[in-house]
Each structure stands twice: as C-alpha cells, then as structure tokens.
Image (spheres, grey):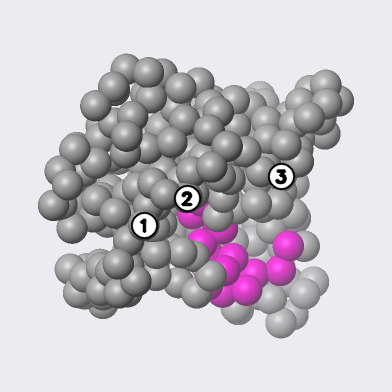
C-alpha cells in the first residue's frame, strides 16, 4: 500500500491536468511553499482520491485511511511540513471529492486526532496486523527478535492502559471528544484479549491487559536493542522505502523498527 502512496505523480495521467493546477492554487499564495512542497501536495491530493475514479481512493475503507495517516506522519516528520498546508490540502481535496458525489474521503479531523499520539497509535494499530508473526517469534525463545517482540507487547499494553485511562474514562470522551482514539483502543483490547486467551502457551511470555505489573516480561540484555537495530539497517541497506525510514528515523523507538522489519521480511501488506 505504501508503494502506491509513494508512486511518482508525473506518471499519473491526471498529474498535469488536475494535480498540478490544484496544488498551484493551494501553494502559490505562500511563495516559499510552492517549490518545496509541490510534489508532496500532488501526492496527497492523489492519495486522498481527488480527481480519481478508483473506488479504493475516492471511497476508502478504514484500513486505507489508517495507513495513509501513517504515510503522512512519516513525511511530516521527515520534511517538517507545516500543518496549515496539510489542512488546506485536505479541505481542497474534500471540495473536489464532494463535487464528484463522493463523501467518504479520509478526513482531516481523524488525521489530526491521530497526531495527538502518533507513535503510540502506530504501535497499537500494528499489533492486529501482525498477530500471527508475533506469535511465531514469541514461541522461538532463541529467535533474535524474541526479546524485542516481548518488549513491543509490553509497550502496547502499557500504552493501551495509559491512553485508555487518559482519553476514554467518560462517555463524552468515548463517544465524542476522543471517539476515534477510543475506538482504536477498543479494537486493540478485543484483539489482545482474544489473542491472550487463545494462546495459553504464551501466558508466561506476555502480560494480560488486567495485570498490574508487567515489567518482568521483557528483561533484555542491555546491548541487544542497539545490536538488532543495526541489523535492521544492515538488512535494508540505504533503502529509502517507508518501512525502514519510519523505523529508524529520530524519535521512533527500536521496537517500531523491529515491527517494520517483520513486515518487510514476511512481505506483509499493511
């Protein structure tokens, strides 16, 4: 999916007819923005489904929007893209999509809520996408990613508890103010509880969501994370693909790099 988001816009038949003029309108009033963010703008307009007849783009499902937000977050971190540009691109794209009779575009409001805790939401949402691979690694005590995987599980449980307590403690929070965040946390809770109950052989390896203290589940040798992070970089080389870039950029933890390495190695589509 990320490969589609990153495709060269100049290869698209709509580039010069639609994307370029649309982004000219958005960026030209801000002279410094136009040359710097034009390519990004055209990609985002395209990925949001403006001027598209592809139902995957102009009638996106929840999964596509979720991964669009991941892709967007990475580019914002990498290029320091101002939020006023993002907001304007979303609004202009929505105007175009609405005029074409489609009303199911990935929304800016959901994206901005995602940005409140982006790394946390990335980790938690990726759990459900990787359950089978995670179990396989956890069952191999000598697997080089075993301890990092357990640490990732611990982080998910810890973040779930913290965020659920902070954002979803009242009906108003759950149904209005943080509806999207709470919905995602609820999906994680249900998936994790089912995963925990169905895999009795993992009970001593991963914590329950209802356990008070979970630190002892991921005691790793202090040198292991740095060593394994190097392995991620070595295996991927200098590739600029999104999985490697997200995993190794400043501010994103090693366990996320590990998780994206799992995606890459097993050719998962996220």
Find disc 2 in the rendering and name its residue: 215
Secondary structure under tag 2 reads: helix
Q: Earlier in the sequence, mark 1 or mark 3?
A: 3
Secondary structure mainly formed by the magenta segment: helix
Q: Position of residue 27 (x, y in %)?
A: 71, 68
The residue drawn where x is 33% and y is 29% is 203
- The quadrant of the picture occupied by the C terminus is top left
Residue 216, compared with residue 62, is above or below; it is: below
The residue drawn where x is 59% and y is 61% is 41
Quote the CA–CA distance across marks 1 and 2: 8 Å
Q: Position of residue 6 (x, y in %)?
A: 40, 57
Mark 1 vs 2: CB contact within 8 A: yes
Residue 219 disc label: 1
Q: Position of residue 7 (x, y in %)?
A: 37, 56
Secondary structure under tag 3 reads: helix
Q: Quadrant of residue 254?
A: bottom left
The magenta stretch is 69-83
Mark 1 vs 3: CB contact within 8 A: no
Camera-nearest label, 1 or 3: 1
Find disc 3 in the rendering and name its residue: 113
Q: Nearer the viewer, residue 103 or 107?
A: 107
Q: Is residue 112 left or right of residue 106?
A: right
């Amino acid at each position: 999916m990320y490969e589609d988001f990153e495709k060269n816009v100049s290869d698209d038949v709509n580039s010069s007819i639609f994307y370029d003029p649309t982004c000219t309108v958005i960026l030209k009033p801000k002279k410094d923005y136009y040359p710097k963010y034009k390519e990004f703008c055209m990609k985002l307009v395209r990925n949001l489904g403006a001027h598209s007849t592809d139902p995957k783009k102009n009638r996106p499902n929840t999964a596509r929007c979720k991964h669009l937000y991941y892709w967007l977050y990475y580019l914002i971190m990498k290029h320091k893209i101002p939020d006023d540009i993002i907001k304007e691109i979303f609004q202009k794209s929505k105007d175009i999509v609405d005029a074409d009779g489609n009303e199911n575009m990935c929304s800016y409001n959901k994206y901005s809520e995602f940005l409140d805790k982006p790394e946390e939401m990335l980790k938690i949402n990726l759990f459900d996408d990787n359950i089978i691979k995670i179990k396989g690694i956890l069952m191999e005590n000598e697997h080089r990613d075993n301890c990092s995987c357990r640490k990732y599980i611990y982080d998910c449980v810890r973040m779930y508890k913290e965020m659920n307590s902070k954002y979803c403690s009242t009906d108003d929070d759950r149904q209005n103010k943080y509806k999207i965040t709470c919905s995602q946390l609820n999906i994680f809770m249900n998936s994790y509880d089912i995963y925990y109950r169905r895999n009795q052989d993992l009970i001593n390896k991963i914590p329950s969501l209802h356990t008070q203290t979970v630190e002892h589940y991921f005691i790793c040798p202090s040198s292991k994370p740095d060593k394994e992070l190097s392995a991620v970089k070595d295996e991927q080389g200098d590739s600029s693909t999104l999985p490697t870039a997200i995993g190794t950029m400043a501010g994103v933890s090693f366990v996320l790099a590990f998780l994206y390495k799992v995606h890459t190695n097993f050719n998962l589509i996220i």
